[in-house]
Image (cartoon, rainbow, N blue to C red):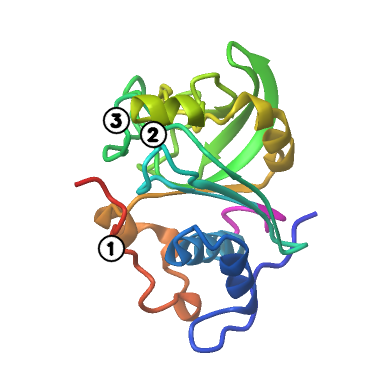
């Protein structure tokens, strides 16, 4: 079962948000705030069931850094902090181009609900359904899934200046892939961030009235030059 995400906010910050930010001090606290806001809004609007676990991907960070955090919202714990690949046509070390088009080989932004697992060409994989029309709602048709990949190698990334890249999937290290996938399968949430101003201005998950937090729009301090 999911957990109730909403917590009473004081001066724009909920107790849950503050705890998540402290659990992942290397993550941008504003990105965590946006992810939690989107998760709360999706649950409140009925777009997704309340989730127990939330994965946050910050594509404004370089691929050589850890930029995937998986939280257990019910237990208020950080389960994983990992490297994650972006699509080969999204950029080199920095991702700066995103798409919802088939065969674009670019990553997609926004909020996703996780679904079933399967074994395919990339091994054990997790299907994801994009919840944002025009932004990521073709994720399933594009086979944008979470899977393990040998090119997600932090040591090699330091040598060559970037991680290997996917066809748009948020691929992770093979050593943790199965555990991360099992943690996130069946109705959890994945939030993929980049300071795309059109998406930030128009996403329905940042429009939940009184729950919308003021002054938390990151300005891309980690974006590619």
Residue 219 marker? 1
Residue 177 position in % (x across, y down): 65, 30
Residue 55 position in % (x across, y down): 58, 49
Q: Which residues are magenta?
A: 46-53
Q: Give me the C-alpha separation between circle 3 and circle 1.
A: 21 Å
Magenta span dominant secondary structure: loop
Question: In this rendering, which labeled residue sits more in front, label 3 or label 1?
Answer: 3
Residue at the extreme left of the image, as rendered? 225
Badge 2 crowding class, 10 Å Cα cut-off, few under 14, some 14 to 19, many 20 or more, is many
Secondary structure type for disc 2: loop
Q: Give me the C-alpha separation between circle 3 and circle 2.
A: 12 Å
Residue 129 position in % (x across, y down): 55, 37
Secondary structure type for disc 3: loop
* Residue 144 visible in the current orientation: no
Is 55 left, or right, of 199 in this rendering?
Answer: right
Residue 128 position in % (x across, y down): 57, 35
**Which of the two discs, 3 and 1, labels the residue nearer the N terminus?**
3
Task: Name the residue beneath numbered marker 3.
Answer: 92
**Which of the two discs, 3 and 2, labels the residue nearer the N terminus?**
3
Going 30% across and 62% down the picture, which residue do you hit?
A: 201
Is 1 left, or right, of 138 in this rendering?
Answer: right
Going 40% across and 24% down the picture, which residue do you hit?
A: 165
Secondary structure type for disc 1: loop
Residue 11 marker? none
């Amino acid at each position: 079962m999911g957990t109730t995400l909403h917590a009473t906010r004081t001066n724009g910050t909920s107790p849950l948000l503050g705890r998540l930010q402290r659990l992942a001090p290397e993550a941008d606290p504003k990105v965590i705030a946006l992810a939690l806001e989107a998760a709360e809004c999706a649950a409140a609007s009925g777009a997704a069931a309340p989730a127990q676990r939330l994965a946050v991907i910050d594509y404004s960070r370089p691929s050589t850094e850890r930029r995937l955090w998986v939280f257990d919202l019910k237990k208020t714990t950080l389960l994983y902090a990992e490297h994650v690949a972006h699509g080969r046509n999204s950029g080199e070390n920095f991702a700066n181009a995103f798409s919802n088009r088939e065969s674009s080989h670019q990553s997609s932004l926004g909020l996703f609900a996780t679904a079933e697992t399967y074994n395919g060409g990339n091994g054990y994989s997790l299907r994801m359904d994009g919840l944002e029309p025009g932004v990521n709602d073709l994720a399933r048709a594009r086979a944008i899934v979470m899977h393990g990949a040998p090119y997600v190698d932090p040591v090699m990334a330091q040598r060559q200046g970037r991680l290997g890249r996917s066809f748009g999937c948020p691929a992770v290290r093979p050593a943790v892939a199965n555990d991360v996938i099992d943690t996130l399968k069946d109705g959890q949430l994945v939030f993929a961030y980049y300071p795309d101003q059109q998406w930030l201005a128009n996403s329905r998950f940042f429009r939940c009235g009184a729950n919308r937090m003021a002054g938390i729009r990151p300005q891309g301090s980690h974006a590619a030059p």
